[in-house]
Image (tube, helix red, strand yellow):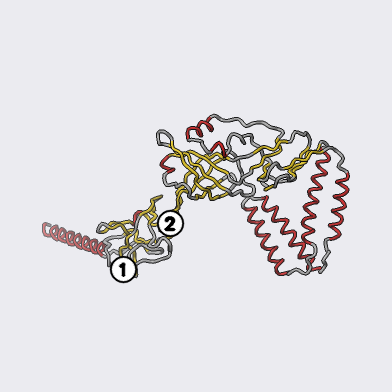
Amino acid sequence: MKRTFKQLLTTLCSVSILVYAVFQLSLATDDSVETENTFYSVVNDIVNAECYVFRNESLIIQSADGARCYSAENGDKVFLGQELCVTYQDYSDADVQERINEINLQLAVLEQSNGSYFADLGRINENISDYMMEILYSVADGDLRAAKRQQSSLLVQMNRRQATVEENNNFFSDQIYALKQEKINLEGGLTGAKVYTTSPAAGYFYTEVDGYENVFSATMLEDLSLSDFERLISSNPQPAKNSNAIGKIAKSSKWYIAFVCPRREAAGFTKGNNYTVNFPYSETQLEMTLERSSGSGDGEKMMLVFSSHTLPRGFNFTRKQEISVVKSTVQGLKVRTTALRNQDGQVGVYVLSNNRVVFKTTEVLRESGGFYLVALPDENRHTVRSATKLSLHDTVILNGKNLYVGKVLQ
């Protein structure tokens, strides 16, 4: 019995030693690693804010009562003395004038279309295709006014194609004559009193009046301090009511936005530099110039003032609106934080190259969501590869056992 127990104990010890040896050997020879390729990425440093729009605008007053029929559209560039609006005391006359305006648009299209049968049909077809794409893009961007203008150009090209195919130089003459006769008859029926309103200056005409034209003016903004700006927006100024205003005119294309943000967010902005500003209300992105900045007494806040001469069609100039400003853009390679290592005082990662482990250095620029954005070997050419610095499409080792430079992995 005693001898049997001794044999059993010897057997168990031998098995345990064998299992342990096999386990240690497996650890020593385990070459399994997890890898991931680097990829190019761009990160924007964005400041979100609530801005106010400042602009020099003058109201255009027309005291006559009646139906208003606009000759100029919202946002049009107008010249001194240009007709902007006709006010009819007889409301039916306003309906007639609207029809006359429609006829004028149709005549403009048909007169451009006539005399085109000798045109290059191939070129016309290309123009039709281009205008159709532009209309689709304008609709997708929400700029229906631009789509409407392009629609007229598209109609001209389609009419020219028809005239060219028919080889008729005066293909639309009958339609033009009929529309002109209709216009003469309609104008002869306008018997009621009417008042014309013309532009008092050259500039940009807007039919929408919000009553803040004298409150948020560019002139006021020139000497406005941060404290003055905060008092202005916190006082909740009431819009001026003026039912006699048919619209307003801005003599200059220059306009401004102003907003307040924490000093730490304002750090990095440079006066005179251009920055990308996103306007969600208009689904528009504009390049604007930083005009100036002004700090608070306690140094915790900053007022930033940006300007632009760009006036996109259909842009929403609502006085108070949300914006986001791209302060800076950083490009680099994106790698997981678990891959970063420190070897001999240098920051870098293990990279698998031809089944061999190599170490490549890198510089961390940003960290976000479990990833590092690290520097490119050449910031001007992101596809450049380096033998010593982490490069695009390198196979980075995320984890593994007993890794060292020169190790060969099967």
Left or right of 59, for residue 292:
left
Q: Where is residue 136 in the image (x, y as percent from the top left)?
A: 65, 56
Please state which amino acid type lies under the numbered disc 1.
Answer: Arg
Left or right of 80, for residue 22:
left
Above or below residue 178? Residue 67 is: above
Residue occupied by mark 2: 331
Crowdedness near tag 2: few (<14), some (14–19) or many (≥20) residues, C-alpha within 10 Å = some
Sequence-earlier tag: 2 or 1: 2
Element under disc 1: strand
Look at the image and tell me in which quarter the N terminus lies: bottom left
Q: Where is residue 309 in the image (x, y as percent from the top left)?
A: 58, 48
Residue occupied by mark 1: 356
Q: Position of residue 171 (x, y in %)?
A: 83, 63
Q: How far apart are marks 2 and 1 (CA)?
A: 29 Å
Left or right of 23, for residue 216:
right
Above or below residue 63? Residue 388 is: below
Q: Which mark is residue 302?
A: none
Front-most of residues 405 and 145? 145
Crowdedness near tag 1: few (<14), some (14–19) or many (≥20) residues, C-alpha within 10 Å = some
Please state which amino acid type lies under the numbered disc 2.
Answer: Gln
Element under disc 2: strand
Front-most of residues 195 and 121? 195
Front-most of residues 30 and 17? 30
Q: Where is residue 39 in the image (x, y as percent from the top left)?
A: 42, 60
Q: What residue sits 21% from the left and 60% below the top?
A: 20
Q: Which of the two marks, 2 or 1, is nearer to us in this view?
A: 2
Q: What residue sits 71% from the left and 38% below the top?
A: 246
Q: What residue sits 43% from the left and 54% below the top?
A: 330
